[in-house]
């Protein structure tokens, strides 16, 4: 069993219930992972994903090995049949097979390059590990998705949802650096699995996400209108998907401020973190009583632990 995309979740409601059960007693399955090793491979930086996935594995009694490919591993070659006469020292075929000798489960973080849309959509790093490793693979944020984050988001929404049918809004917000679409993509995919919730995406015109992902979702270009009656505001920046990887808008009017939050139904504020304060969200909002970003980050552990448990039980 791999967990590389939100569509690996067969029944979101059941998964969320199980994760909340784990949260109550995180050490209940302390023996499940005994003598099993999780390898965490990072091609990009991380705080939450690294520590929460490691914590989840430790809660299950697993051993954990971490490797940063950015500065520690050999540069990998992913092309088939290449004459390896330039930068790359090792082919993914050997690397994935070798890591599989040491690890019972491999988790990988490899972001979008944001230069070549086709290449990013092909998920070269993640899909090559899936192809050449001989053990289960977990996606810790790939070029197009962040399914562990989306599962943690679902757990958080369940914990804070109102009694009435909830309205959830995903809003784009400005950022000085070009960011991938992965978190937003997985959030949209996760929201499609939610029953009895209304979901709206709001962003400036031109900032449409991959239409294959958003095809059944409501898009509202007027942020103020989208915020009306919202119970959850999930802020996230992503770079332009059409003008691929470019920043074509940095309008500060899209920052989530206290005035914007007043348009909502006393909404909870969510963000996957790390967040640029007073770019994405004002200090007042993120430091305010309706901000649930820390609990959201806490839930990363239980999302990862659920996925690891499922893999270990198989
Ligand atoms: N939200 C998230 O994935 O955080 P990190 O990039 O710090 O792991």
Image (tube, rainbow, N blue to C red):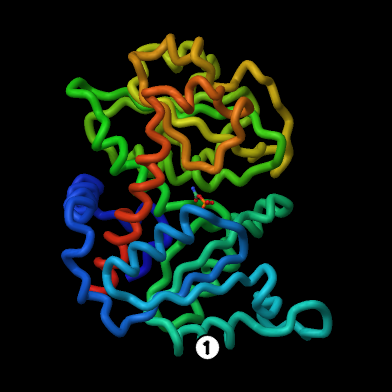
Residue situated in front as seen by the camera: 158 or 191: 158
Percent position of residue 220, x then y: 49, 20
Query: Above or below — where is 213 with respect to 35?
Result: above
Residue that appears at 58% across and 84% down? 95
- Up the image or down, 21 lies above or below 189; here it is below
Name the residue carrying label 1.
98
Residue 167 position in % (x across, y down)? 32, 23
The location of residue 47, given as percent across then percent down, is 52, 54
Q: Is residue 235 above or below residue 251?
A: below
SS type, badge 1: helix
Q: Quadrant of the C terminus?
A: bottom left
Residue 153: x percent and y percent?
36, 42
Crowd tier of the residue under label 1, counting other residues whose Cα lies within 10 Å: few below 14, some 14–19, many 20 or above: some
Task: Name the residue rendered at 45%, 59% in the picture.
Answer: 51
Please identify the residue farthest to the right as the structure is shown: 86
Task: Give me the residue at 48% from left, 22% from top.
Answer: 285
Which image quarter is the N terminus in? Answer: bottom left
Q: Residue at x 48, y 43 (%)?
A: 185
Examine the image and state in which quarter residue 165 appears. top left
Residue 314 in sight in this render? no
Residue 124 visible, this angle: yes
Given residues 142 and 295, the one toward you in this image is: 295
């Amino acid at each position: 069993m791999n967990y590389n995309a939100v569509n690996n979740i067969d029944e979101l409601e059941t998964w969320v219930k199980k994760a909340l059960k784990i949260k109550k007693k995180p050490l209940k399955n302390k023996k499940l992972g005994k003598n099993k090793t999780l390898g965490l491979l990072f091609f990009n930086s991380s705080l939450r994903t690294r520590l929460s996935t490691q914590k989840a594995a430790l809660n299950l009694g697993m051993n954990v090995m971490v490797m940063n490919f950015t500065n520690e591993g050999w540069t990998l070659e992913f092309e088939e049949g290449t004459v390896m006469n330039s930068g790359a020292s090792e082919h993914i075929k050997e690397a994935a097979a070798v890591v599989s000798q040491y690890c019972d489960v491999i988790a990988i973080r490899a972001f979008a390059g944001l230069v070549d849309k086709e290449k990013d959509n092909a998920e070269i790093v993640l899909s090559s590990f899936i192809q050449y490793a001989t053990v289960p693979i977990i996606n810790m944020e790939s070029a197009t998705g962040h399914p562990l984050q989306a599962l943690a988001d679902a757990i958080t929404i369940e914990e804070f949802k109102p009694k009435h049918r909830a309205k959830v809004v995903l809003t784009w917000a400005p950022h000085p650096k070009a960011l991938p679409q992965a978190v937003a993509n997985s959030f949209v995919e996760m929201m499609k699995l939610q029953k009895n919730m209304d979901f709206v995406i709001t962003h400036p015109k031109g900032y449409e996400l991959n239409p294959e992902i958003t095809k059944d979702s409501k898009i509202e270009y007027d942020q103020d209108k989208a915020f009306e009656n919202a119970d959850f505001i999930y802020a996230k920046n992503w770079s332009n998907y059409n003008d691929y990887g470019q920043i074509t808008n940095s309008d500060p009017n899209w920052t989530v401020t206290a005035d914007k939050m007043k348009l909502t139904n006393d909404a909870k504020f969510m963000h996957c973190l790390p967040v640029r304060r007073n770019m994405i969200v004002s200090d007042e909002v993120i430091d305010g009583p309706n901000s649930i970003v820390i609990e959201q980050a806490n839930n990363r552990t239980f999302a990862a632990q659920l996925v690891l448990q499922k893999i270990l039980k198989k």
